[in-house]
Image (cartoon, coloured by chain):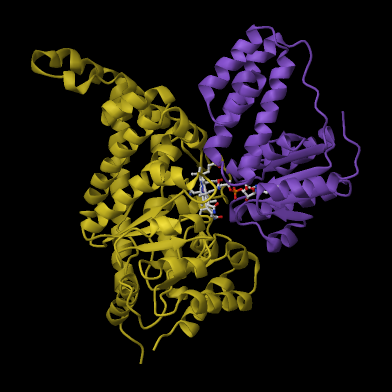
Amino acid sequence: MLSELIDSIAGMKEERALSLARELLEGGVDPLKVLESCREAMTIVGQRFEECTYYLPELMLAGEMLQEISQMAKPRMTKGLEVRRRGRVVIGTVQGDIHDIGKNIVTMLLDVHGFEVHDLGVDVPPQKFIDAIKAVQPEILGLSALLTVAFEPMKRTIQAITEAGLRDSLKIMIGGAPIDERIRQYSGADAYGADAMVAVELSKGWTEGHKTLA
Amino acid sequence: MGKSPEELYQERAKRVWDVIALKEPDRVPFLPTFTFFPVNYAGLSCEEAMYDYDKIGAAYRKALLDLEPDMFNSPYLTLAIGPLLEILDYKLIRWPGHGVAPDKTYQFVEGEYMKAEEYDDFLFDPTDYMLHTYLPRVCGTLAPFSRLPNFPMIYYTRFVAGLTPFGEPEVGEAFEVLRRAGVESQRLVGKAVAFGQEMQALGFPAQYGAFAIAPFDYIGDFFRGTRGIMVDIYRRPEKLLALLDKVTRITIQSTLRSLQATSVPVVFIPLHKGIDGFMSLEHFKTFYWGSLRQLILALIDEGLTPCVFWEGHCESRLETIRDIPKGKAMYRFEQTDFAIAKEVLGDTVCMRGNVPASLLCTGSPDEVTAYCKQLIDVAGKGGGLIIDGAIGIPDEAKPENALAMARATRQYGCYG
Ligand code: B12
C-alpha cells in the first residue's frame, strides 16, 4: 500500500492518496513510514519537474497533498522525522519584491535533494537575512529577485552581510528571471542560477565533501 | 528643415501600422514602454508621481521629448492612482506612504481573495458576487456592501424590505466613498485626455486605447492566487473552465465599452501565468490559450489590434500562439529568443522587444547599441520588428542607455 501511496501522490491522484494515507495511519502503520513514502513521492515529482513533464500545478498540488498527510500523521507521531541533510540554506526574496513562485520552487527542489532550507519569505530586509544567518549558520544563502528595483537591495544585502563579518563562511547564489552574470558581478554574489536545478547543482557543489548533518 | 508635428505624427503612425500589417516600413519603430523611468529621470519620487497629476505629466513629457519614440504610453491610468487607492482603502496594492517607502514603486499583494467554494457564486451571478463578497474584501471602505439586498428581490411591494439596507449609515458612507472615487476618477481621466491631446500636438500618437487581462490571469492574479488557480486545474477543472468562459465574455464586453471613449484601436494585454515554466503545453492550450485566443479573435473581429505581451520565456508556446489572423496584432516578448520567434511567427505577427533589463540598468551605451544592431539584424529583415526594452525601459535604467536605444534604432533600423 505504501508503494500505491507513492504512485498516487506522484500521479496527482489526490483523493486516492489522501484516503490511502488515512487507511494506512488508522491501520496502525508507523506515521514515519508514511511520511517517508511522501518524501519519496516528492522526489519523483521533483524529477518530473526537472524533466519538464511537471510544472506549477503539479508541484503545488503535490505540496498540498504532503501538507495534508503530514497533518494527519502529526498527532500520531512520538518523535520527529530524522533526515540526513547535505547542508543548510537560507533563502528569501529581497527587499522591495514580492515575487515568490520561483523562490518556492528552488526551496522545494533543494528540500527534495536533501538540503535543510530556511525560507524567510518575500520582501526580506538585509537585517533579517543577517539575523537568520547568525541563527541558522547556513553554508549557503539564496537571494531571489524578479524586479529591477530589487538589484540594489540585493547588492545592499550582500554588502551588509560582508560588513557583519559573515561573508567569508558563506556561499551566495542569486536568481530570478532578470538575473544574469552582469547582476552577479554587480551584486557581489558567488554565482547565479538561471533555474532551480542550477540552484541544486551549485548547492551540491558547495557542500561536496562536507559530512552530512544529522 | 525640421518636420512639423502633424507630419511627424502621420509618419510615426504609418511606420507602426505598416509593421503591424507586416509591410516593410521606412524604419524599425521605437516604442519604449515607460513605467517609473520618466519619474526617476525627472528626479521625482514615486510618491509624488502617484499623487501629483501635473508632475507626472511633466516628467513623461520630458522623457518623450528627449527620447522621441514613435508612440507614447500614458502614465495616468496605471501610475497616478494614489488618490483613488486612498479613497478606496484598496487592499490589493501597497503604495508609497501605505506600506511602501516614498521612493519605491507600488506593489501588488497576491492572495486568495476568492475562496474555492465561491466558484458557484461567481458563476451564478458575477455582479452579485462582486458586490456582496469580493469588493467588501478588497476595498476597506466598501465593506458595508456585504449588507446590500439581493437586487432581483427588489420588486412590487417587496421594495420596502429591499430598501432598508440603504438607510444604514455605513452603507450610505460606502456610497459616498464611491461617489468621491468617481469624481476623482473623472479628474484623472480628464488629465489623461488632456495629456493625450498635448502629445498629439507634439507629434506623438498614442500606443493604447484600452487594457485587458487574459481570462486565466484575471482569475489567477486577482481572485484565486497562483496556488489557488494552479491546484484548481486538478481539483475543479470544469468549474475553472466555466468561469474562464464567463470571464472571457465579460472581458470582451467591458473592453469594447471602454474603447467607445477613445479613437485608439489598440488593446494592451500583458500575460502572467501561462508562459513557459508555468504549465504543460497541454494545460496551456486548455486553460490559458483557449480563452485568450477567443479574446484576441473577438477584438480583431471588431477591427481592433491586440498588443499581447508574452512575458518571461515563451519558446514552447510559439507554434500554438501562431494561430491568429495574419497582420492583425502585435506580440511583445520579454526573454523569448527573437531568432526563433521570427522564424515561427515572422509571417503571422509583428514582434516587439527585447533589450534586456540588466543591460539597460548596468551596461554601457555601446553595449546597448550593439544589442540593438544585432536585434535588427536577427529579427528586422523585411519589417515585423519594433524595438522596446524586454520589460520596457526599466525604472532604474541609465538615461544614457535609453538614449542609446533610441539612437541605435534610428541609425541601424532604416530600410530601403
Ligand atoms: C507571475 C508574475 C507576477 C505575479 C507574482 C506572483 C507571486 N506570488 O510571485 C504577480 C501578478 C503578483 C506579479 C506582480 C507584479 N509584477 Co510580476 N511577473 C510575473 C511573471 C510573469 C512571472 C514570474 C514567475 O513567477 N515566473 C515563474 C518562476 C518559476 O520563474 P522565476 O521566478 O524566474 O524563477 C526561476 C529562476 O529564475 C530561478 N530562481 C528564482 N529564484 C531563484 C533564487 C536562486 C538563489 C536561484 C539560484 C535561482 C532562482 O529558479 C526558478 C525556477 O526555475 C514575471 C515575468 C518574468 N519574466 O518572469 C513578471 C515580472 C517579474 N513582474 C513585473 C512587475 C512590474 C510586477 C509588478 C510591479 C506589476 C505591478 N505594477 O503591479 C507587480 C509587483 C510585484 C512586486 N512589487 O514585487 C515585471 C518586472 C519589471 C521590472 N521592473 O523589473 C516582470 C518582469 C514582468 C514584465 N515583463 O514587465 N507578477
Q: Residue pushed farthest top?
A: A27
Q: What is the quadrant of residue A94 in the picture?
A: top right
Q: Which chain is yellow?
A: B
Residue B99 in sight here: yes
Give above or below for B374 relative to B230. below
Q: x%, y% of residue A164?
A: 85, 45
Q: What is the quadrant of residue B196 in the picture?
A: bottom left
Rendered residue at 56%/41% (across/down): A54
Residues B125 and A158: in front is B125
Q: x%, y% of residue B358?
A: 62, 63
Rendered residue at 45%/40% (across/down): B221
Q: Quadrant of the N terminus of chain B?
A: bottom left
Give above or below for B287 relative to B317. above
Horizontal side of B98 relative to B195 (left or right) equals right
Rendered residue at 70%/62% (across/down): A181
Q: Quadrant of the C terminus of chain B?
A: bottom left
Q: Colour of chain A?
A: purple
Horizontal side of B275 relative to B346 (left or right) equals right
Residue B84 in sight here: no
Residues A4 and A21: in front is A4
Rendered residue at 66%/41% (across/down): A47
